[in-house]
Image (cartoon, rainbow, N blue to C red):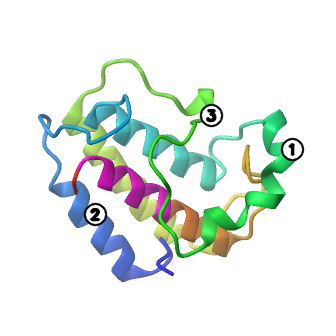
Amino acid sequence: MKSLFQPEAVHDVISRVETLQPATQRLWGKMDVAQMMAHCCAALDMASGQLSLPRLFIGRLIGRFVRPIYSNEKPFSQNNPTDPKLVVSDQRDFVREREQLKVKIRQFYEGGEAKCTRHPHPFFGSLTPQEWGIGMYKHLDHHLRQFGA
């Protein structure tokens, strides 16, 4: 499985981010392309410990049972719910968000497993650094597919 701790996966994701344009239309969901990139930045901040979100009640109930979804081979499905604290609904500057996302992807990779958060995921709970790396790749892949990249 691809992980954001693998140089080839990082190169692939950044190359796909660079194909996005301000007018790129979503295939599903509600965010525009700049909002999606801001959302992905927030998720990377969470994975690197720069943003700590509390556990969701539903996550405490079922998170550990569905945790394999986060790091298995299957891509995330469309229209999954998003933690309200990670929803981006305001207008964002496309160029700024694209550059920021590329920076955060590189920082996550360069920080490696040692810089991964130990704080639990709001829904899935405690994750290993390896699970964070796979999950972050899957999350970015999901949103890049959302915009045809």
| Mark 2 neighbour class, 10 Å CA radius: few under 14, some 14 to 19, many 20 or more | some
**Quadrant of the frame with the C terminus:** bottom left
Q: Earlier in the sequence, mark 3 or mark 2?
A: 2
Q: Position of residue 28 (x, y in %)?
A: 33, 39
Mark 3 vs mark 2, CA separation in Å: 24 Å
Please state which of the two labelled residues, at mark 3 or mark 2, is closer to the viewer: 3
- Of helix, strand and loop, which mostly describes the magenta segment? helix
> Pointer 1: what residue?
60
Number of marks: 3
Q: Is 37 located above or below residue 149 in the figure?
A: above
User: Callout 3, which amino acid?
Assistant: Asp
> Pointer 2: what residue?
14
Residue at 38% x, 18% y is 90
Disc 3 secondary structure class? loop
Q: Is residue 92 left or right of residue 132?
A: left
* The residue stretch that appears in magenta: 138-147
| Between 79 and 109, the one nearer to me in the picture | 79
Q: Earlier in the sequence, mark 1 or mark 2?
A: 2
User: Callout 2, which amino acid?
Assistant: Ile
Q: Is residue 110 left or right of residue 91?
A: right
User: Callout 1, which amino acid?
Assistant: Arg
Residue at 31% x, 54% y is 144
Mark 3 vs mark 1, CA separation in Å: 14 Å
Q: Is residue 55 visible?
A: no
> Pointer 3: what residue?
83
| Between 31 and 130, the one nearer to me in the picture | 31
Q: Earlier in the sequence, mark 3 or mark 1?
A: 1
Q: Quadrant of residue 96?
A: top left
Mark 1 vs mark 2, CA separation in Å: 33 Å
